[in-house]
Image (cartoon, rainbow, N blue to C red):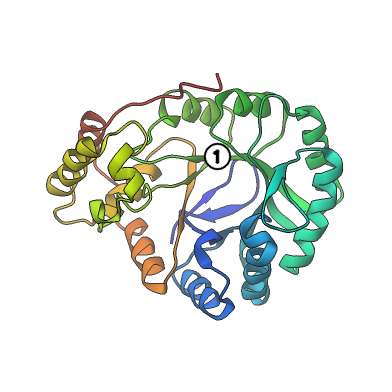
Amino acid sequence: MKKRKLGQSDLFVSELGLGCMSLGTDGVQAQQIIEAALEEGINYFDTADLYDFGINEKIVGSSLKNVRDKVVIATKVGNRPNQEKNGWSWDPSKQYIKEAVKQSLKRLGTDYIDLYQLHGGTIEDPISETIEAFEELREEGFIRYYGISSIRPNVIREYVEKANIVSVMMQYSILDRRPEEEMLPLLSENGISVVSRGPLAKGLLSEKMLTKASKSVMESGYSDYSYDELSELIPALKEKIAKDRSLTEISLQYILSGPAVSSVIAGASSVKQVKENAQAVKTNPLTKEELDFIRTVSKANRYASHR
């Protein structure tokens, strides 16, 4: 599998990363999925301290311990669990970040984290303090690089201007093209990579298409689309472009065509899903005609809030 440089770091990440949130808590099954990912050439594994309140980090760390020097482990911080571990509060303080990283390292069973990401963020945060925490962790050797996971333009701009982030994780798909107009050019100009999450739009852009529509999607639609609009657009993509390709392939290749995009993060709850997603990114890129068609029939939506 091809690899791309992550921002201005010395990390090279596979074009497909494994989103570990959907692995579940069955360690044996999760390890099988991770091993399948490694076999397909995936070297980028994304977790968070919030996922199953730390269990996910333990599973990921245990499954990757024998190949630690060959993989890129990314995790996240900022959501502080309560004592009962049935909820959490937002805490981007320096004190909490420097405390939480040690717990993540312990659960992951590693001496360092390749990419440490702020798991959210608001414009009201003590941003300078948060940046200071990440910078100190890098100097101390606990993390190699840091980034943020955000879809808020005002927050992203602050970190682009003030921090040494190498990446921004954001939701990006054919059904959610908000990053294209302002965020992708900004990040590309500043040498910061985009890590895309949600590329298959809750399965709507996979081969199962509208059969994956939840009750809420059927009632309220997805992103800026009503269910009726989805019922027209998704079959049109399949008919016009995905004749010799899977819809999963179209969806992932569309994201990989974007400027600044280094990796597409897709979750998998089975070995079969890993293999299907991996096959989708190993094929030929979309042609200009295919990209133009997608941009013509889908909405060029933009961020309306957090300006």
Q: Please state the total of marks drawn on the protein image.
A: 1
Estimate the x, y position of residue 38 in percent, counting from the top left.
Answer: 51, 71
User: Which residue: 44% across, 57% down?
Assistant: 2
Q: Residue furthest top?
A: 307
User: Which residue: 12% across, 48% down?
Assistant: 239
Query: Which quarter of the figure has residue 63?
Result: bottom right
The quadrant of the picture occupied by the N terminus is: bottom left
Residue 77 in view (yes/no): no
Q: Against 41, is 124 above or below?
A: above
Query: 10 Å neighbourhood of mark 1: few (<14), some, or many (≥20)?
Result: many
The quadrant of the picture occupied by the C terminus is: top right
Q: Type of residue at label 1?
A: Ser
> Label 1's element?
strand
Q: Against 178, is 113 above or below?
A: below
Estimate the x, y position of residue 250 in percent, counting from the top left.
Answer: 27, 49
Estimate the x, y position of residue 66 in percent, counting from the top left.
Answer: 66, 77
* Tag 1 residue: 193
Q: Nearer the viewer, residue 43 or 176?
A: 176
Q: Report whether 303 appears left or right of 66.
A: left
Q: Report whether 213 appears left or right of 101.
A: left
Q: Nearer the viewer, residue 216 or 132?
A: 216
Q: Report whether 195 appears left or right of 119.
A: left
User: Which residue: 65% across, 41% down?
Assistant: 147
Residue 104 in view (yes/no): yes
Q: Against 155, is 277 above or below?
A: below
